[in-house]
Image (tube, rainbow, N blue to C red):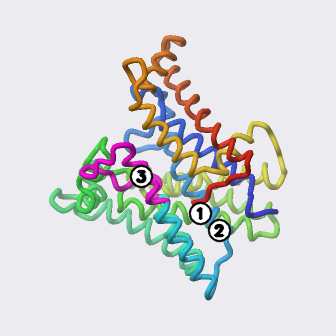
Amino acid sequence: MNKDRLLSLDVFRGLTIAAMILVNDPGSWSYVYSPLLHAKWHGCTPTDLIFPFFLFMVGIAVSLGKPKTGEDRKLITRKILKRSLYLFLIGLFLNGFPYFELSTFRIPGVLQRIALVFLAIALMHHYVKDSVQIIVGGILLVGYWIIMDFVSVPGIGAANLEPETNFAAWFDRLFLSGHMWRLSETWDPEGLLSTLPAVVTGLLGVFTGKLLFTAEDKSKGLSQIFVLGNVLIGVALGWNMIFPINKSLWTSSFVLYTGGIAMNFYGILFWLLDIKKFRSKLTFPFEVFGSNAITAYALSGVLASLFGILPLADSSIHQVLYDGLVSIFGDYYFASFVYAIGFVALCYLPILLLYRKKIFIKV
């Protein structure tokens, strides 16, 4: 098996990126089918699975690298630091594009969280024993729960999980005031404190990769993944009763719930694509997206911004296209969905060209 090019990982990554672009770019945010929206607060929709799935895959990719020692470790550490920095800077660029208003510039973001999670789990993979990684993961989940559910919020009062008054929101305002998510300005779904449990989402991917790729009997490794994944889901549902599943807060129950689902989903793809060697034209577009996932995400962010500001017929490109779809289908929701599908297809074309030319852009 060529671990450097796992079809299951490319397809899983591609599915996730395509879904991320789809939910980020509707024709109108006023008309979006409910499964394509995040949960309003507590709970989990299919859309809430997308980001943790991507962090989980970052962990799987990290697990493919053999831990280094000596001079090799120093070299890989520099590479890890550089890659994390590049991801973070790309995220900052996408946050600011095209106006770069520094006074209200959002610092957190999707790529920024990916950068920090990658940095943490990659360094642990090369410097820390597996047993210690498990202990660290447990401390992060339990510690975050204690902070969020039991520690009083300075200047506010008792611990709570409300959007603006929870401990994570207070912590983020302490360091990021004026530079958070523009739709809230008082809290950020990719904030500082909630990135700590997100590290465990990445670690679950690392553990999954190690269980699968080090096992001589792949069927036994898969069985372990399916059992562990469903145990995590069960624990998460129990924990949910006192620490609700919540993507915006990235609660510990959310980590276990989405991690368990990711284990099951990736296990199925691994069995189907890398063990049974199933091939289909249906999986090819996702293999393409997965081969240049970060490029596809960055491209979608730039295009979405340009479509929103470039003028066309006394309006923007985005608005003209959406209005045209509404006039064709006569249904605002369906037109919004078709716009999102079309936008995914538009982003796919340059990524397909890169794939055909065997150009794989690595950050």
- Left or right of 268? Residue 296 is left
Residue at x 45%, y 52% (from the top left corner): 110
Residue at x 38%, y 53% (from the top left corner): 249
Quarter occupied by the C terminus:
bottom right
Which residue, given by chain and number where applicable, does mark 3 sit on? 93
Q: Nearer the viewer, mark 1 or mark 3?
A: 3
Which residue, given by chain and number where applicable, does mark 1 sit on? 59
How far is the residue under mark 3 from the one under mark 2? 29 Å
Residue contact at pointers 2 and 1, CB within 8 angstroms? yes
- Is residue 110 rendered magenta in the image? yes
Which residue, given by chain and number where applicable, does mark 2 sit on? 63
How far is the residue under mark 1 from the one under mark 3? 24 Å
Neighbours of disc 2 within 10 Å: few (<14), some (14-19), many (20+):
many
Which of the 4 image quarters holds residue 73? bottom right
Q: Which residues are magenta?
A: 87-113
Residue at x 33%, y 48% (from the top left corner): 100
Q: Amino acid at mark 1?
A: Gly
Any part of residue 341 in sight: yes
Residue contact at pointers 1 and 3, CB within 8 angstroms? no
Q: Amino acid at mark 2?
A: Ser
Neighbours of disc 3 within 10 Å: few (<14), some (14-19), many (20+):
some
Q: Nearer the viewer, residue 49 or 29?
A: 29
